[in-house]
Amino acid sequence: MTTLILLRHGRSAANASGVLAGRSPGVELDDTGRAQAEKLVDRLAGVPIAAIVSSPMLRCEQTVEPLAQARGLVPGTEPELAEVDYGSWTGRELKTLVKESLWKVVQAHPSAAVFPDGEGLAGMQARAVAAVRRHGARIAAEHGPDAVWLACSHGDVIKSVLADALATHLDNFQRIVVDPGSISVVHYTETRPFVARVNDLGGDVAGLIPPSPKRRRRKAPARSSDAVVGGDTGA
């Protein structure tokens, strides 16, 4: 049921300045972020991407633009992949937020964290996972179970999707690192997902290329839901 490339947007001016941008309008990529977006075109060359879905935040739209233009794709906008609504924390410096009592809850018990005048992290995970599953089912129906698609979102959102795929509680999601411009990969099957990569900033992506129809006929018709005993043999 499809392979999902989770792309965190490239570095933004807010990332570089230590500000929690949240849903602030007009937050753009900085020079480093724009370079990360351009490099993605060559990095994913050869990987047949069936669809691109993006958070409506400007920094995500800018990140997928070069890749979408190179592939002739029109990115879809998915509000449920938008950044966390940090409420009154939005736009504040991280060095001041660490002094808030809620900061410790976000770190140690994020499933209980609800941002003042904003949303809770548990609610964010629910909407993001539902969106990923919905788009995955749609793309599988349109392009087949071997389809590869890309979703561009934000650090906490991607970490929550990965936590779900790993079947780990949201309270553990702070143990996952997702840097700007990184990709993480999840293979979805009928019974469970397989997390193939996390926070990949430059590794080989040949393993994301689906087998040719001839090769597929000689082997399994689709990705199995079973794990390989003893470990996979690689791409």
Image: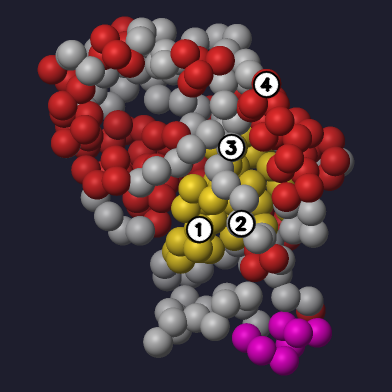
Mark 1 — residue? 197
Q: Is residue 102 visible?
A: yes
Q: Residue furthest left?
A: 101
Q: Which is nearer the N-term, disc 3 or disc 4?
A: 4
Residue 102 among magenta residues = no
The residue drawn where x is 66% and y is 60% is 205
Residue 106, placed above or below residue 140: above
The disc label shown at residue 181, or none: 3
Q: From mark 3 to mark 4, how far is it between C-alphas?
A: 12 Å
Q: Secondary structure at mark 1?
A: strand
Question: Chief secondary structure of the magenta span?
Answer: helix
Residue beneath disc 2: 203
**Going 50% across and 19% down the picture, which residue do you hit?**
16
Which quarter of the figure is the N terminus placed in? bottom right
The image shows residue 107 at horizontal and vertical percentages of 21, 33
The quadrant in which residue 53 appears is: top right
Q: Tell me which numbered mark, 2 or 4, is placed earlier along the sequence.
A: 4
Which image quadrant for residue 34?
top right
Q: Is residue 43 left or right of residue 161?
A: right
Pointer 2 local density, CA inside 10 Å: few below 14, some 14–19, many at least 20? few
| Amino acid type of the residue that numbered disc 4 sits on in the rendered structure | Asp
Marks 2,1: beta carbons within 8 A: yes
- Looking at the rendering, the stretch of residues picked out in magenta corresponds to 214-220
